[in-house]
Image (cartoon, rainbow, N blue to C red):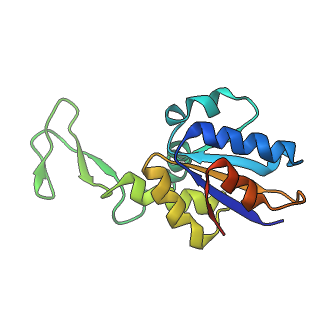
Amino acid sequence: MSMVIGLFEQETKVLKAIRQLREAGADNDGIRVAVKNRESAPLLADDGNVRLEALDELREVRGNDRVEDDDAWVLASAPLGFPVGNMTASGPTGVVLVAGYGSEDEFGSEEALYNIGVPDEAAKRCAQAINLGHYVLLAETDIEGNVASLLNEAGANVIH
């Protein structure tokens, strides 16, 4: 069973593609939709039969494993007025941000997609689409017929 990936700009077209896949005999377990966050996909989130992969949630879970990276968010606690690097701890708690990622989306989307089974060569393109607010339908099914054709018919840009 191979994965066919469809990039969609409209949520209603994703729902159409899911309906067509189901009518063709695809199992619900083989259909997932990756989105930036649940708020960006209210129709999909409300449909109890759609497996939604919200990248903000996936990054949050995986982000806890990344604190050791050189460019990870690091919080330091220091007495007020105490220098930390080239900054001084200030504020009521004395907690300062020492370093941070250039972009949370850049850090996590591609890796999160890879971790849920999106092939390496497609993960970057899918991450870019999601970060632009698009929807990524991941279809792993052995239905007869051409899954890519069904997704194209529903309005997807298909990645092979």
* Position above or below: 127 against 17: below
**The C terminus is located in which quarter?**
bottom right
Q: What residue do we see at 68% from left, 38% from top? A: 15
**The N terminus is located in which quarter?**
bottom right
Q: Can you name the residue that lies furthest to the bottom here?
A: 121
Q: Position of residue 138 (x, y in %)?
A: 69, 54
Q: Position of residue 56 (x, y in %)?
A: 50, 44
Q: What residue do we see at 75% from left, 48% from top? A: 31
Q: Position of residue 78 (x, y in %)?
A: 21, 44
Q: Is residue 63 left or right of residue 50?
A: left
* Position above or below: 3 against 97: below
Could you say which quadrant of the image residue 150 lies in? bottom right
Q: What residue do we see at 34% from left, 55% from top? A: 103
Q: What residue do we see at 71% from left, 62% from top? A: 4
Q: Is residue 1 left or right of residue 138?
A: right
Q: Position of residue 126 (x, y in %)?
A: 54, 59
* Position above or below: 128 against 24: below
Q: How many marks?
A: 0
Q: Is residue 107 visible?
A: yes
Q: Is residue 28 visible?
A: no
Q: Can you name the residue that lies furthest to the front here?
A: 153
